[in-house]
Amino acid sequence: MSPSLSYDVVVLGAGVAGLSAATQLAEGGARVCVLAKGVGSTHLAPGTVDVLGYSPERVEEPGGALGEFIAAHPEHPYALMGAQAIAPALEWFAACIERGPQPGYSYTGGLARNHLLPTAVGAIRPSALVPETMAAGDMRAAGPVCVVGVRVLRDFYASVCAGNLRRAGIDARAVEVDVDVGRVEANSLGLARCFDDERFRAAFAARLAMLLRPGERVGLPAVLGLRDPHGAWSDLQRRLGHAVFEVPTLPPSAPGMRIYNALVHALRRGGGRLVLGSEVRGVEREAGRVSAVRAHTSGHETTYHARWVVLATGGFASGAIELGSDWRARETVLGLPLRGMPPAGEPRFGADYFGPQPMSGVGVAVDSSLLAQDTENVYVAGAALPGAMPWREGSGEGISLASGHFVAQAVLEHEVAAAAA
Amino acid sequence: MEKLSADVLVIGGGATGAGVAWDASLRGLDVVLVERGDLATGTSGRFHGLLHSGGRYAVKDPAAADECARENVIVRRVAADSVEDTGGFFVTTPFDDPAYADRFAQGCRDSGVPCQEVAPAQALREEPRLNPRISRAFRVPDASIDVWKLVWALSRGAQERGARVLPYHQAVAVHRDGDEVQGARVRSARTGQELDIEARVTVSAAGAWGGQLAALAGIEGVHVMPGKGIMIAMNHRLVDTVINRCQMPTDGDIIVPIRTVSVIGTTDVGTDDPDDHTVLQDEVDAMLEDGERLIPGFKQARALRVWTGARPLFEDRKENGASESRDVTRAHALLDHRERDGVSGFVTITGGKLTTYRLMAEETVDAVCRQLGEARPSRTATEPLPGSEDGEYYRLAERLDRREQHLLEDQLICECELISRGRLEAAFRQRGTTDLDDIRRQLRLGMGPCQGGFCVYRTAGILHGLDGIDTEQANAALVDYVAERWKGEWPILYGDQLRQARLDEWIFQGILDIEHLP
């Protein structure tokens, strides 16, 4: 007989949706356990909170554009939750980061206006709520820009970034700094750890300062610290005497890992539990309810009983939804029904890479309260929801945070009602 | 207009055309080779990579089997650096007629294909993923051959002997004066500029496009029907030996381990257009099922991509034509148009298979020499290609060996295929190209499991850092490559490869936003 634990809520998945739902549940007094096979998309994503970037043209004011977007996409998660679900979720998130383990680190912006941030190729990407360390990269601001490459980082090329900014009419140039990190190549994570070290920053700033011209804003790959990004960023600005901004690049993502660290910190502070390396191997059902999941962790199995389950396991990217070689899709964790599959015989993908991709909207079938179809106690949040194309719309974190907030509120309301009864 | 002149103009830069250029150069002839795309991007670059032992034809076509067996020995020697000595098995699965095995063994004996029967248990020890219910197994000297390496070696060898090789030059007209072909006009795909090439003999080595080229020369009845076949690359070496089903040749009965992947092939569907690359769902499904028959669990591996190639299947439709090419038992066709049509200075070589490219080239240049009235014997059966002088086969671990020697000096840019920054920069400089697909064929850039997800941005960034490359070119390199790779991915996306594709979408669209480059 495997050990058995009991919680109010079991949350499956440790991405932005799962961790934010779990943390808000814990903060609301619920006993919560997060089970996750691994970390979620935070470590891959740019670390910004994109709510609505393209519809399909670039969106300047996401708050204002949501009404029309929802009307045009009645199956979209935003349409199910309603636009009003988004703002409180962003507010909660920004506050959560500020209370986080990274002193002084904060996000800036909101639904009023998208920031227009350069990507690592120098395209301009709209994003609603962004780390303070990226805000100075808003390309609406006037003044020259200097994009800085770090030779050892093979995942960022300043000359391409600056070249495309110039093509977009921005006064931008590129420089490259060679720093010794003890080896010939590094990724963002390795370099971010270097930037946590004040001596490294001092040496780096000394080299870079010689290359800068007065009045330039300085764009660096998003590697300015993990433990204390606010400290690293402010210190670098002070040493250089220039405004500094981070540019997100290839995974792993330091800004994304900061989000993960802050959310896990908040979850634990609220009394919630996180068990990474857990794979759901079995489900116990009673009528329309999932009453328990059996999870396999480091060679042993534990049964987690819960009144509520939040499924925030992601979509195809995480493997939670899988397309078999028989061309049938299935939800692999709880075996829930899906929605959005193109009919058999119809194309699943389009030949044009940038064209319509019919499979993209596949997700777990839910009702308008985000309860999974045919269940009474399984809520769905994040990329598992159908009807969205987050990487095209620029809506990933917006959907995750809003749905995480939405399902946490729904569960807490049920709990309060049950307690009152 | 610029003009070139040569003894021999070769049109078509696949294995046959490059083979002709090498053979003719070795015989001391002055050669110009033109190819409409990059070298080996037609049928040669779109095959499975099998150097036949001849076993496949042992029953159906003993003459072809004999030819393959002889050429296999020669190619292994002169092009060793392009060949991996995998060896091959013919295995009788429960889905095959058990009576075929004895006919196969007899056919191999009759046609000179080296073949040794081994106990099924022995074959299974060597290839543990094989269907455990095989009842017979035969060992043959099949091998895998890297066609790009081969064609570059041929081209480099020819160039070292004075040949001029012009990729991305398409023949737009064949110059004909009465009954004499005198060369061709070609147009650069890159600059649009045209160039006249005057030649004593023009060789059409355009394979599946040979009919089109003959028509351009005003010669009728050269009918080359493209036989379209699909192939699927799986993400790693499911087998280390070429595996054939022991049955009459049919669809989906060969798995070839080549470089870091395994390729299953193929089908054979007649089509009108050699540039038709349509992949049908039914073909993909059938091919995956065929894979399961040879290797249970085949479909659980990641299918990286699917592509098609166009076999040139020659049929002579000329009334009262020379009889030689009519009663073909051999799979390739050499048309000496002086004999066939009374048009001198023009020779067509078509049909055939990669394994016999050298023989085809030799026979072609023999015909060229006959037309020139010069006796110059072929030396390609004994002269090793550049890079193969030591006779050592390619080994799978070669790249890792080399990489480990430079681990601390050079950044790794493509993790899947172990390509360093130094090699990449050298390839860009050497090729003078900004097309990442050209670099892919040389270095296998982006051909591994992530299909370019991580290396393509890096490569575009490195390219941009080279002298004379502007941002538009770097952008085009990036976007074109991503769009091009997608063509081979989407018809077969499922399982973990779909996961990978989704991660790549996050990178290209979510993080880099390449769709909105200025």
Image (tube, coloured by chain):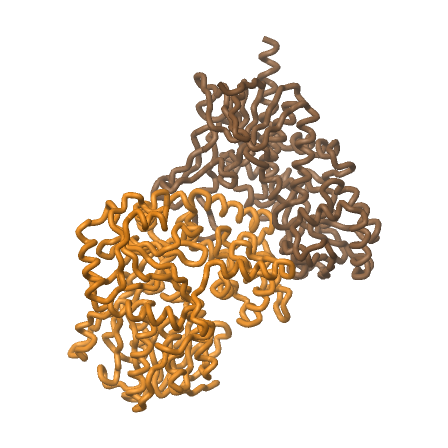
Chain colours: A brown, B orange
Q: Position of residue A335 (x, y in %)?
A: 44, 29
Q: Residue at x 67, y 37 (%)?
A: A259
For the C terminus of chain B, the image quarter is: bottom right
From where the camera sits, is residue B170 visible?
Answer: yes
Q: Nearer the viewer, residue B241 or A45?
A: B241
Choose between A258 and B244: the one closer to the eye. B244
Using the rendered image of the protein, determine whether residue B281 is visible from the camera's viewpoint: no
B296 or B138, which is in the foreground? B138
Left or right of A383 on screen, residue B46? left
Q: Is residue B70 left or right of residue B433?
A: left
Identity of the residue furthest to the top in this view: A421
Q: Residue at x 78, y 37 (%)?
A: A104
Nearer to us in this view, B322 or A196: A196
Q: Position of residue A47 (x, y in %)?
A: 65, 42
- Residue A212 vertical position relative to residue A48 in the rendered view, above or below: below
Look at 72% across and 39% down and name the residue there.
A107
Q: Residue B198's spot in the image, x, y percent?
A: 40, 87
Q: How many marks?
A: 0
Q: Locate residue B75: give its quadrant.
A: bottom left
Q: Is residue A208 left or right of residue B441?
A: right
Q: Position of residue A354 (x, y in %)?
A: 50, 52
Quadrant of res A132:
top right
A133 sits to left or right of A416 = right
Query: Measured along the vertical axis of the image, is residue B471 above or below residue B299?
Result: below
Task: Please determine whether, in this image, residue B123 is positioned above or below residue A325.
Answer: below
Residue extending farthest left: B320
Q: Is residue A153 above or below residue A416?
A: below
Corner quadrant of residue B277: bottom left
